[in-house]
Image (tube, rainbow, N blue to C red):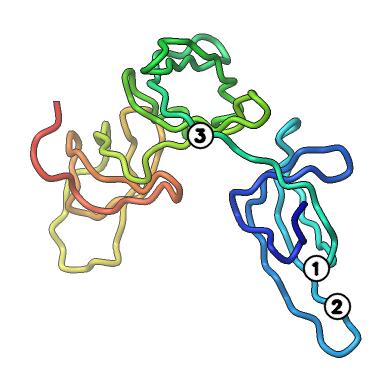
Amino acid sequence: MIAASQLRPGMAIRYEGQIYRVLIADYHPGQGKMGGVTHTRLKNLSTGALWEHSFRSDLKLEDLSIEKAPMDYLYADGDQCYFMNPETFEQLAVPTALIGEQARFLQPEMRVTVEFLEDRPVNVILPDILEVRVADTAPPSHQQTDSVWKPAKLENGIEIMVPQFIKTGDVIRLDVADMKYIDRAKGPKS
């Protein structure tokens, strides 16, 4: 059991029979006779629904342990993505909906971290930064204005904003969590 005031992003809890992952936890101490409160944003791991809720800071919640395992991405088939444990060679199917939009960045043999809760996969963590190729964008412009960006379509079909000097075929580094351009990749990518 854990007090609501000790909730941190990334934790898993059981509340009213449902299992949630804590996405945001913001503790506000109370004043005088008013007790503190923890404002949270939770993701229901059964339904995927997001829920914003405030807990009294002294409320006891069941803390669930999340196991992490490195896995190699194999392929996608329909609405499932298949991963393999590199040590035991066991294969695991994870619903694409669980991975979300980031599933489009998976490449064969990519090493990712799969999180398990009660022997069930609940999350797939991709690297924070990936190198991706620009499939289509407007011709480069070498203006001196750094604040002007243009849309670019990546090889996987996702559209992001990039600086004017980026051209079709360039390999860029992308912040996967925010889907934002970081910089141009150094060296060739095959």
- Write the residue at 26% across / 31% down: 135
Q: Secondary structure at mark 3?
A: strand
- Write the residue at 16% across / 63% down: 143
Q: Which residue is mark 1?
A: 57
Q: Which of the two labelled residues, at mark 3 and mark 1, occupies the earlier sequence position? A: 1
- Write the residue at 59% across / 49% down: 10
> Mark 1 and mark 3 in contact (Cβ < 8 Å)?
no
Amino acid found under the numbered disc labelled 3 = Lys
Q: Secondary structure at mark 1?
A: loop
Give the x, y percent position of residue 129: 32, 45
| Relative side of 87 to 96, left or right | left
Residue 68 bears which disc, if any? 3
> Mark 2 and mark 1 in contact (Cβ < 8 Å)?
yes
Give the x, y percent position of residue 38: 75, 66
Q: Secondary structure at mark 2?
A: loop
Q: Based on the displayed image, in which of its 4 quarters is residue 173 positioned?
A: top left
Q: Nearer the viewer, residue 43 or 119?
A: 119
Residue 79 bears which disc, if any? none
Residue count near mark 1 (Cα–Cα under 10 Å), binned few <14, some 14–19, many ≥20: many
Q: Nearer the viewer, residue 26 or 85?
A: 85
| Relative side of 7 to 69, left or right | right
| Vertical order, 170 against 26 (above or below) | above
Q: Which of the two labelled residues, at mark 1 and mark 2, occupies the earlier sequence position? A: 2
Separation of disc 2 and disc 3 at Cα?
35 Å
Give the x, y percent position of residue 115: 54, 33
| Vertical order, 183 against 115 (above or below) | below
Q: Which of the two labelled residues, at mark 2 and mark 3, occupies the earlier sequence position? A: 2
Q: Based on the displayed image, in which of its 4 quarters is residue 19 positioned?
A: top right
Amino acid found under the numbered disc labelled 2 = Gly
Residue 35 bears which disc, if any? 2
Amino acid found under the numbered disc labelled 1 = Ser
